[in-house]
Each structure stands twice: as C-alpha cells, then as structure tokens.
Image (tube, coloured by chain):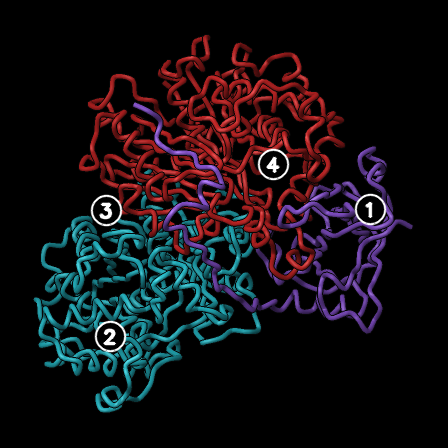
Chain colours: A purple, B red, C cyan
C-alpha cells in the first residue's frame, strides 16, 4: 500500500480545476487596555514607563495591570531612563512575507536599565526593537551583545503613541 | 508543581499512521486527516466504530485558511457523531494531542481515542510566512513588521553566545536529521548534506540559514490510544504512556533569558515524575525532541535534561545522538528531514517512538534494546513545552 | 465520580468593554473566581485551561497570551479551540484521571474588537461554499429554523414567543445588556434578518471574560468555597462544518448525543422529573425549542408547552431563567460558560432577581453557526 498524499507542483496546481483564491475579511480594533495605554502615551511623550509589582517588586516593561508571576495587581509607575544593553541580536535579510530585503535590518532584545537591577537577572524589563548604526559583522562577531544602547525617538510631532515612536535603539 | 500525582489508569498507544509530508499536497485538510486516521486504525485492526472519542490537533487556523478549523476537520478526523475536541498550543500542539488523548482515556470516560494532528501550510499564499505576521502582540510587536524567524534567530543567537556554540556545531543537527530521514519514506527533505552545505545556504535571519530550518509542509499523523484492558485485546505489544507534562512560560518573551528553555524543563519534570523517572539522562533510551530549527534540538535536549546545559553540542559532536549512538535522537529524521506540518509533526514524533519501541521502524530501527522514550514539542512565543514519556 | 464547580468569576457583560484589553478582562475574571473558590492562583491550581479561537481573537496562535492573566505562567497551561464548556469537560477528565485536583478554566470574548464579524463567520465555511457568496453567513440557522418549524408544526409566533419570554426575563438580570421589553407584535412586525428569524430572535454580542475553578470532590470539601456539583458533562460533534450538507436539518443530534452521555454520568433516566430547571441554547429563538426536544425536556412540539407557560420562570420547568443568550448575548467561546455561571448562581441561591427554585439543573450549549457541536452539563446543589 502506497503512502497517502499526492505532491503537486505549483504550476500544476495553477492549472487545476476548482482552485479557489480567497482573501479573508478579518479586521480588528484591539483594545490596548489600562496598562498599555499609559505605556503608549509615554512613548508619545518620549518616555519609557514601567510598572512595579507590589509583591515581588520587579519592574515590568512593557507594563501590565498584573504581575504574571505573582498573579497580583501591579503597583506604582516608574519612568525608566530608556537606556539599556543588548540582550541578544540578529540580522534579518527577509521581510515579514519572506521577500528579500534590500538592506538587512538588525533586531534585538534590549535589557533596560532599571533601579535595583544588576543586569544578569533571568527576568528583566525589556523591549523588542530594531538596532541602528550596528553592522552585520558586529552582530555576527558577537560584539553587539551587552552593548549599551538608547532609544532614538522620532521627532515630537511625528509620535503617535506607538511602539514605532521609537525609531530604533542606537549605541552610545 | 503538583499535577501528575495518583494516576489511576494505564493508557497505551496501539496504532499509528502518517501521510506523506510534502510542500504541497493535493488532498484537502479533511482528506489528510482522514488518511492518517484510517492508517492508524488499520494498523490497530480497528474501525471507526471502535473509537469512542476524537482529539484533533491543529496549530494555526490561518494556514488552512479556515476559521474554527477543528470543526472543519471533524469528520475528516473520524469525529462524525463523536465527542471531538481540538487542542492548540502553537508549535507545542503536536505532543499536546496524545497528552489530551491520554486524559480522555485515563478519565475512564473513553475506552479508545483517535488522536489526529493535521496542518496544511501550503494554503497560505504566496508564502506561509505571511500567516506568521499575525502571531504577534497586535500593539507591541506587530507594528514592527516582524517575521517569525526574527525571534528564533534571537533565541539561537543567545544560545550560541551564552553556551559558546558555533554554527558548525549546530549545523550537525541538520546533517544528522536529514540523513536519518533518508530511511523514512514519508519524508519531505531527506538528504545527505554536509556542515558546509548548511553554512553556505541562504542566510534568512542570521544566525538562521535556510538549511537550519525545517521546511513548511502539508501532512497529517494519527495515533490510536486505549485503556489497558482494551489495549491488551488489541495488541500484544502496546506502548504505554508513562508520563505527560506541559507548561507555558510568560508571553512576554523579551522579558526573560532565552538561553535555556526552562518551560521545557518544567514540562519534562512533570512527565518524568509521573513516569517515575529520576535520572532521564540514564533512563531514556531514545528521544524525539522538537527540531523545527537545528539549534532547537540541542536546546530541547538540554530542557529535557538529556544533556547538561550547554553540553548538547559537545555530545552531538561525539556521535552520542546518532542512530547508533548512546542516545539516538530524532531517528525519524525529525522535522528537519521530515518537514514540519506543525501539529502533525509532534504526533509524528510520538508515532516514531511507538514504532521504535515495538521494533517496527524498519531501516530506521535503533539497534540497541529500548525501554523508555521521550518526545517533546515546543512553540508559541518561545514559551510552550509539551512532553510525553513512553515505554514498552 | 462527580467534580465541583468551586468558584466562578466574571468581568464585562457589556456590548463593549473598551477600557480593558482582553488580557485585563481575563485577569479580572480570574481574580474573582479564585477568591470565590478560596484558592491561591500560584499555589493551589494544578492545571489551567483556556478556550479560544484564533479568528475571534484576531491573533494567530492566540493561545500564546493565555497563561499570564490567569496565573498559568510556568504551570501546566493549555488551550482548547472550543466552547468554554468543552474546557470544563477537559477539567472533568483531568480530575477523574488523577492528573489534577484543581483546574482553572478560562474563556473570554471581545466581539466589540472584531470589525468584520460577517467576514470571520464566512471564513468558517468550507472554501467551496464561500464562493457561492452566501450573503449572511448565519444562513444555516435559517435553514435549520425552517426545517424545524416544518417538522414540529411550530409557527413563527412560537419562535417570537421564545424571544419575548427571554428578552423580558433578562430585564431582571443585571448581567443582561440585550434584555428588552418587547411583545409578540414587535417581533412579528419586524423584518427577518435570516428568514424566519428577526433581529429580536438573534442574540446580540457581549464582551465578557469568565473563569471557573473545577475541583475534585475531596479537594472541594477541604477548601472553603461553595461547591456546586458537576455530575456529568459531555460534548458531541454531529458533522464537520466542512460537510454541513450531511447535517440532519431541523434537528441537533449532537445535543442529543451529548445529553445521553451526560445523563448517564449523572445517573439521570428521566430528565424532566430528575432536574428542576435548565439554561439551554437560545442564540436563535428556535434553538431553545429544538434544544428542549433534543435534551428530552419536551416531547416533539415543544412550542405547545411554551405556549402554556410551562417554561416560564414560574412555570412547571423554568427554562433560561437568566434571560438566556437572547438577553445576555453571545460571547464566542465564552457563551457556554456564561450559561454555566447563571446556573451555578441559581443553585447557590444567589441569582438575585432571576432566582428560581431547584436542586439540579441542565446546562446545554451549541457552538453556533456553522458548527454542529453541542455540550451538555448536569449540575446539582
């Protein structure tokens, strides 16, 4: 008995009867909620704000209404300097839809500087973003790990309360 | 962790079946599910009439392009007029399927369970990567326009940096698994390649290159599970589900250290505890860890406590994980060799262990004596671990 | 072997809850449920189960966001793409198997976030069917309603009467945003949306999060919560949504099958006598009558008992004393748990203005168009 499943080539598929092209109509307006609204407002003002857990005292960026480790309500808001270190980085040569990019882009997780943090905790306030002014070689050689970075903000008038109000993180 | 105590009823796997895994299959998702399910039933000498309950695993509705995909798949998966449930924990779905089937049977409410994993990724057009654009946090992440490989590249880079692992070492996983797949007639990407080939392949998101990744795939895999009293009537060689475990880490993946999959360890500890395994590195005879990327096999082996932290690359280099090695890993060919129809792939890994433990794996058969085996799936935003321990 | 509904919590019950994210709603519901059950999220709960569907959320692999708000981080947490009652069923099995003693079950819905509901419903149809341009994707409900009327002899007025009974009843329920003072004449004078159903007879949408704590009997007796017993629960799928032409139109065999097994588990042979009231599927008016028949709570032609007032809150067998989905609204995969919530409050005697008498209740829900999956649970005090 043969193995079930018949492989078809893409060209073959296009010639087949009954092929349906269908583009879903699925649009959403996501509610940011209490905590992220404050965070987004902060970004518009050029600030990175976090939130402290009343129970374990950790600082959460992005801020939430609750600490997921303690399952307890979050407490006071803290403004962070925005500076930090590169936790890990990679170089992307493809777009979100797998098209080849003309210029590769460097993306990273930033471990943010925060009061009471030494910099080696397994859990930390952090941001996922692009790096600018960093070469492919610096990433591949591992030189960028631990590098000090800070946000490069978009000009005030262009900020609209989005994660993209930060253009990227840059070395300093 | 306090789950997994006082388990009452033994449950066994008594049948398994797979479709071809391929980039583009003619069959609809329902037909794929049906083909795998009927193969599994045939192998157990059962018909649909003998099945009490159905568990479906399918990871992402958007791949098949159908909302409420479990409902859509229901009769293909053999669920006509039966209790049907669909589980979904992203990439972790595959092994979650037999785990869920396990508690269906162990509860005493189903004597037999058909467990089916299906994914048809080729429906997404022009490329399945487009679907991954929607897995992100819609406010914090999606505006950055990330592609899926970004985040795994970040994890791989962190692992390499932290454990001082070279690309060459990691590429060996791809070499091993694609070679193992040469013996697997269901495989999409079997090949005899070298470390050089991996290092020369297109760099997508450094450090991830084309041959570091399992190919997108269509396919389905199915298992039949039964309670002990029934299983013994079906077959003389049931394969027992000895332990199950699952865990999810925080969805804020950029707030935690990615160099080690602590959630896989958590899930593994749950499964080992239930299975009475105290020293997995000594007691496990064969493993099928999740390998959608080559580094992930190493990462998962460490999480499963089959290697110490940062030690898996060294063991790999020494041939420890070869089919003829001390601890054969991914004898099926893994996802790197088989292709990765997401939910189907974890079911496939469980099926491979079923065949290995029954010495039915043909050319892929591990030659040493086998008693205990472990498989895991991993997924979501680098946060899901699902683990199953089997024995003969 | 029964289990306990030990705690239940909710947040929302408005057509739109714009001030909270879905995760924040989940958190609010979880905190209330755990308080109600007297459990600590991070200490006492063995397994966490979430019920949700990607396209309702607008996120592929939406289960990524399940653990954080419910205390499930670094704990056994998993997601079922199904109605919340199916998740309760998973909890029931986990407890019976010995895997867990306390399971938290979560569902949430923010229909107000979905801007193209019609498009999302259409995406649930078989791709071949979509090309027919079915117009209103709720059409399968219309087909079932017509087939049901033809078989049972129910008239449009009877369907309207279900809407009148439930929408008016909901006026007593603080959680029912779609309650309304309406008459048969209002319904009959209104244009059908999907023939024969008018807008009055189709439930609206409600944003809500519901969290339920299910525990073993042993554990329930140890903890301080106020248990309602889960005596049986089962679900069934008649046909897949991809092959709806095989559905037995005008009937809901999945509900009959689910009820049969749930009753067996609960030791029920005569549900009309052995139970006292029911919260049953009514997101479309005719579904209440059809459900009652499939559940064995009425003979074929349930509309005659409806006309006689038998299913009123003061009748012989109260059905949907909460006001049903027609008053509470539907909430995607949370719909079933909303009905469970109402039944639990009734059995605890905490249903306020909608309180009816009873020791034992049936909860029955359907996953809605275009599925043929139903879930039935039996609860007792």
Residue C267 x %, y %? 15, 51
The CA span between labels 2 and 4 is 50 Å
Distance (Cα) linking label 4 and label 3:
39 Å
Disc 1 or disc 2, which is closer to the eye? Answer: 2
Image x and y of residue B94, in percent: 45, 37
The numbered mark at residue A85 is 1
| Numbered tag placed on residue B80 in the rendering | 3
Q: Chain of mark 3?
A: B
**Do marks 4 and 1 share a subunit?**
no
So how many labels did they put on this image? 4
- Whether the residues at callouts 4 and 1 have beta carbons within 8 Å, the answer is no
Tell which of B267 and A141 is nearer to you.
A141
Query: Looking at the rendered structure, which numbered label has been put on residue B102?
Result: none
Q: Judge from the rendering whether residue C209 lies leftward or rightward of residue C280; answer left or right.
A: right
Q: Which residue is mark 2?
A: C285
Disc 4 crowd rating (10 Å Cα; few below 14, some 14-19, many 20+) is many
Q: Chain of mark 4?
A: B
Label 1 is found on which chain of the structure? A
The CA span between labels 3 and 2 is 26 Å
Distance between the alpha carbons at the discs numbered 1 and 2: 60 Å
Q: Horizontal placement of C248 versus B10: left or right? A: left
Marker disc for residue B262? 4
* Figure quadrant of residue A87: top right
């Amino acid at each position: 008995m043969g193995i079930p499943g018949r492989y078809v080539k893409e060209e073959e598929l296009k010639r087949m009867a009954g092929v349906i092209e269908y583009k879903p109509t699925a649009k959403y307006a996501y509610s940011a909620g209490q905590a992220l609204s404050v965070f987004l407002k902060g970004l518009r003002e050029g600030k990175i704000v976090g939130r402290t857990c009343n129970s374990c005292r950790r600082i959460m960026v992005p801020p939430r209404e609750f600490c997921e480790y303690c399952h307890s309500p979050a407490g006071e808001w803290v403004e962070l300097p925005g500076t930090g270190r590169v936790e890990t980085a990679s170089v992307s040569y493809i777009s979100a839809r797998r098209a080849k990019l003309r210029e590769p882009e460097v993306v990273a997780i930033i471990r943010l500087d925060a009061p009471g943090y030494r910099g080696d905790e397994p859990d930390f306030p952090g941001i996922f973003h692009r790096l600018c002014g960093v070469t492919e070689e610096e990433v591949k050689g591992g030189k960028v790990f631990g590098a000090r970075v800070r946000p490069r903000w978009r000009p005030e008038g262009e900020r609209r309360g989005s994660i993209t109000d930060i253009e990227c993180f840059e070395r300093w | 962790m306090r789950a997994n105590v006082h388990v009452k009823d033994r449950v066994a796997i008594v049948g398994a079946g797979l479709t071809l895994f391929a980039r583009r299959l003619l069959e609809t998702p329902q037909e794929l599910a049906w083909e795998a399910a009927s193969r599994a039933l045939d192998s157990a000498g059962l018909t649909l009439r003998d099945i009490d309950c159905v568990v479906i695993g399918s990871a992402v509705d958007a791949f098949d392009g159908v909302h409420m995909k479990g409902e859509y798949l229901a009769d293909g998966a053999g669920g006509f007029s039966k209790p049907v449930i669909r589980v979904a924990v992203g990439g972790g779905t595959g092994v979650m399927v037999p785990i869920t089937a396990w508690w269906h049977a162990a509860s005493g409410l189903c004597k037999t369970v058909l467990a089916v994993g299906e994914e048809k990724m080729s429906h997404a057009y022009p490329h399945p990567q487009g679907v991954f654009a929607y897995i992100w946090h819609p406010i914090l992440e999606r505006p950055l326009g990330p592609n899926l490989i970004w985040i795994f590249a970040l994890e791989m880079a962190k692992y390499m940096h932290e454990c001082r692992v070279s690309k060459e070492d990691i590429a060996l996983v791809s070499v091993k698994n694609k070679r193992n797949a040469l013996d697997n007639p269901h495989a999409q990407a079997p090949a005899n390649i070298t470390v050089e080939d991996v290092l020369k392949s297109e760099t997508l998101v450094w450090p991830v290159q084309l041959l570091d990744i399992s190919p997108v795939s269509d396919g389905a895999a199915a298992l039949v599970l039964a309670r002990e009293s029934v299983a013994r009537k079906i077959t003389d060689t049931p394969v027992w589900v000895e332990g199950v475990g699952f865990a999810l880490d925080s969805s804020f993946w950029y707030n935690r250290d990615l160099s080690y999959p602590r959630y896989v360890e958590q899930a593994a500890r749950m499964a080992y505890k239930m299975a009475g395994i105290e020293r997995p590195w000594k007691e496990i005879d064969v493993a099928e860890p999740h390998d959608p990327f080559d580094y992930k096999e190493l990462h998962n082996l460490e999480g499963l406590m089959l290697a110490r932290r940062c030690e898996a690359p060294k063991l790999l280099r020494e041939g420890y994980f070869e089919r003829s090695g001390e601890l054969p890993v991914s004898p099926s060919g893994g996802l790197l060799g088989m292709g990765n129809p997401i939910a189907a792939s974890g079911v496939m890994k469980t099926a491979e262990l079923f065949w290995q433990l029954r010495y039915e794996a043909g050319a892929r058969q591990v030659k040493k004596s086998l008693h205990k085996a472990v498989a895991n799936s991993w997924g979501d935003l680098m946060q899901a671990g699902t683990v199953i321990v089997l024995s003969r | 072997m029964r289990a306990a509904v030990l705690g239940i919590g909710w947040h929302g019950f408005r057509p739109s809850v714009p001030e909270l994210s879905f995760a924040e709603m989940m958190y609010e519901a979880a905190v209330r449920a755990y308080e109600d059950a007297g459990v600590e999220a991070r200490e006492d709960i063995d397994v966490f189960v979430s019920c949700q569907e990607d396209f309702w959320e607008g996120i592929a692999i939406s289960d990524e966001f399940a653990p954080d708000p419910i205390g499930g981080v670094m704990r056994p947490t998993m997601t079922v793409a199904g109605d919340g009652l199916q998740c309760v069923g998973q909890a029931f099995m986990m407890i019976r198997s010995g895997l867990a003693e306390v399971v938290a079950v979560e569902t949430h819905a923010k229909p107000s976030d979905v801007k193209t509901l019609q498009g999302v419903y259409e995406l649930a149809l078989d791709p071949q069917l979509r090309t027919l341009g079915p117009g209103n994707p709720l059409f399968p409900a219309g087909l079932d309603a017509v087939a049901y009327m033809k078989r049972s002899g129910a008239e449009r007025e009877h369907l309207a009467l279900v809407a009148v009974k439930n929408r008016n009843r909901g006026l007593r329920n603080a959680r029912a945003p779609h309650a309304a003072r309406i008459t048969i004449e209002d319904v009959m004078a209104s244009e059908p949306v999907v023939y024969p159903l008018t807008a009055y007879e189709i439930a609206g949408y409600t944003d809500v999060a519901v969290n339920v704590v299910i525990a073993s009997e042993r554990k329930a007796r140890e903890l301080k919560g106020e248990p309602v017993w889960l005596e049986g629960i089962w679900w069934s799928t008649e046909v897949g949504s991809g092959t709806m032409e095989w559905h037995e139109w005008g009937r809901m065999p999945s509900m009959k099958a689910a009820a049969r097994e749930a009753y067996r588990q609960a030791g029920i042979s005569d549900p009309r006598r052995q139970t006292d009231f029911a919260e049953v599927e009514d997101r479309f008016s005719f579904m209440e009558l059809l459900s009652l028949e499939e559940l064995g709570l009425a003979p074929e032609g349930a509309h005659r008992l409806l006309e006689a007032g038998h299913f009123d809150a003061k009748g012989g067998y109260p059905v949907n004393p909460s006001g049903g989905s027609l008053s509470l609204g539907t909430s995607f995969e949370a719909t079933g748990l909303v009905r469970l919530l109402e039944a639990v409050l009734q059995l605890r005697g905490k249903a306020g203005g909608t309180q009816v008498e009873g020791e034992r209740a049936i909860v029955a829900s359907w996953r809605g168009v275009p599925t043929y999956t139903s879930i039935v649970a039996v609860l007792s005090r």
